[in-house]
């Protein structure tokens, strides 16, 4: 699913803390396909993650908020 993760203000304003937070989100919450341009400009981590990892991201000290943008589901086959 597509998510937007806003980092806490004090993390966003420190290049080192911001990079460490991104690495932590990628390794612990398994955030993938991060939009690096948005991250570098705004400190927002926009990417893909599995729904079961959402709570991991929400509990991180570096994270202010997590919003789900879209959820992709496999198409259901039509009955014959």
Image: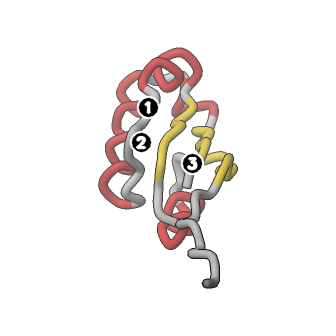
Q: Position of residue 51 (x, y in %)?
A: 54, 67
Residue for point 63% across, 83% down: 79
For image coordinates 58% across by 58% down, the residue present is 72
Residue occupied by mark 2: 21
Kindly identify which residue carries mark 1.
18
Q: Which of marks 3 and 1 is in front?
A: 3
First in sequence, mark 3 or 1: give its number.
3
Q: How would you rate the neighbour count of disc 3 (Cα within 10 Å): few for under 14, some for 14-19, many for 20 or more?
A: some
**Disc 2, SS:** helix
Report how many numbered discs are placed on residues in the image. Answer: 3
Identify the residue under disc 3.
2
> Residue 63 at x, y = what percent?
58, 48
Q: Which of 79 and 27 is in front in this view?
A: 79
Mark nearer the viewer, 3 or 2: 3
Which numbered tag is attached to residue 9? none
Indicate which disc, 3 or 2, sits on the residue closer to the N terminus: 3
Compute the Cα span from label 3 to label 1.
20 Å
**Vertical placement of 11 versus 77: above or below?**
above
Q: Do the residues labelled 3 and 1 touch (CB within 8 Å)?
A: no
Q: Residue 41, can we see it?
A: yes
**Label 2 near label 1: C-beta < 8 Å?**
yes
**What crowding class fits label 1: few (fewer than 14 Cα within 10 Å), some (14-19), or many (20 or more)?**
many
Q: Residue 65: tell me if it is visible.
A: no
**Vertical order, 30 against 51 (above or below):** above
**Does residue 6 sit above or below 57 in this rendering?**
above
């Amino acid at each position: 699913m597509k998510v937007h993760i806003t980092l806490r203000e004090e993390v966003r304003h420190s290049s080192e803390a911001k990079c460490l937070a991104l690495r932590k989100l990628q390794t612990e919450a398994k955030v993938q396909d991060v939009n690096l341009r948005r991250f570098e400009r705004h400190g927002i981590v926009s990417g893909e993650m599995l729904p079961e990892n959402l709570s991991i991201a929400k509990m991180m000290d570096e994270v202010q908020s997590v919003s789900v943008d879209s959820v992709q589901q496999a198409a259901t086959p039509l009955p014959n």
